[in-house]
Image (spheres, rainbow, N blue to C red):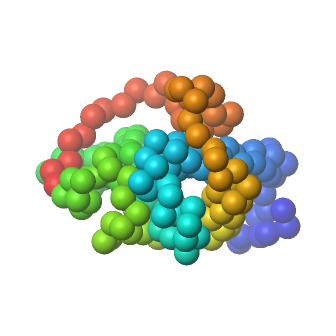
Amino acid sequence: MNAEVEGEKLGDHEIALFFILLMAAGNDSTRATYSGIMKSLLEDRELLEPVAADPSLIPHVVEEGLRMYPAFASMARAATKDVELGGQQIKQGDRLLLWYLASNRDETKFERPHVFDIDRANRGEHQAFGAGGRHFCLGAALARLELRVWIEETLERMPDLQLDGEPNRVRALFLHQYNRIPVRRIPVAA
């Protein structure tokens, strides 16, 4: 709140918007990923049983869950300059939609990308937190810790937990609610 860059501080409106972002990033996102992870575990007893018996596997479960069920399906960005990407011209100001779900299931990067596999060789090479780039999630370590503890505690406290039919879908409070922005589809060659 008191940070200053070149003599400028954040205004009240910017602080309020940042607070809303932090609330979504620290709450809705972790819950969404946790739900996907637990659904995968409960649908596959052959996967669930070894994880429940050996909590040292849970960090692997967390990384695979982040790949399969990233909290953000996509993130919008605006090009800051003209650039060519994959043979396509992108002009300054063009809006781009980065699909984490697609990149995390890229068949050229992940073997059997649609399978929840905690033994995946390239575990942790997902886009869930921005892949270490300029917009890397500041809460990545906390989210991993929260997911690990949440899964550990769930499996320990509810060893007989099972799915009972199809899960109820609940719309996220902040996430996956896209603005209606006109977009130009830009195919990118692999």
Which quadrant would residue 35 be assigned to in this image? Answer: top right
Q: Which of these two is toward me, 9 or 190?
A: 190
Looking at the rendering, in which quadrant would you find the C terminus? bottom left
Q: In the image, residue 54 lies at what x, y percent? A: 55, 71
Q: For this rendering, which residue is in front, 167 or 160?
A: 160
Query: Does residue 79 appear anywhere in the picture?
Result: no
Residue nearest the viewer, comparing 144 with 2 = 144
Q: Is residue 79 above or below residue 137?
A: above
Q: Is residue 185 visible?
A: yes
Residue 122, x across and y down, in percent: 32, 70
Residue 59 image offset from top left, x and y in percent: 53, 69
Locate the N terminus by quadrant. bottom right
- The image shows residue 109 at horizontal and vertical percentages of 24, 61
Q: Is residue 143 left or right of residue 165?
A: right
- What residue is at 36 percent from the left and 67 percent from the top? 119
Residue at position x 50%, y 58% from top?
49
Left or right placement of residue 133 versus residue 81 in this view: right
Task: State which quadrant residue 126 falls in.
Answer: bottom left
Q: Residue at x 69, y 60 (%)?
A: 156
Which one is in front, 15 or 103?
Answer: 103
How many labels were placed on the picture?
0
Q: Is residue 127 left or right of residue 108?
A: right
In this view, the residue farthest toward the bottom is 56
Measuring 52% from the left and 31% from the top, which residue is drawn there?
178
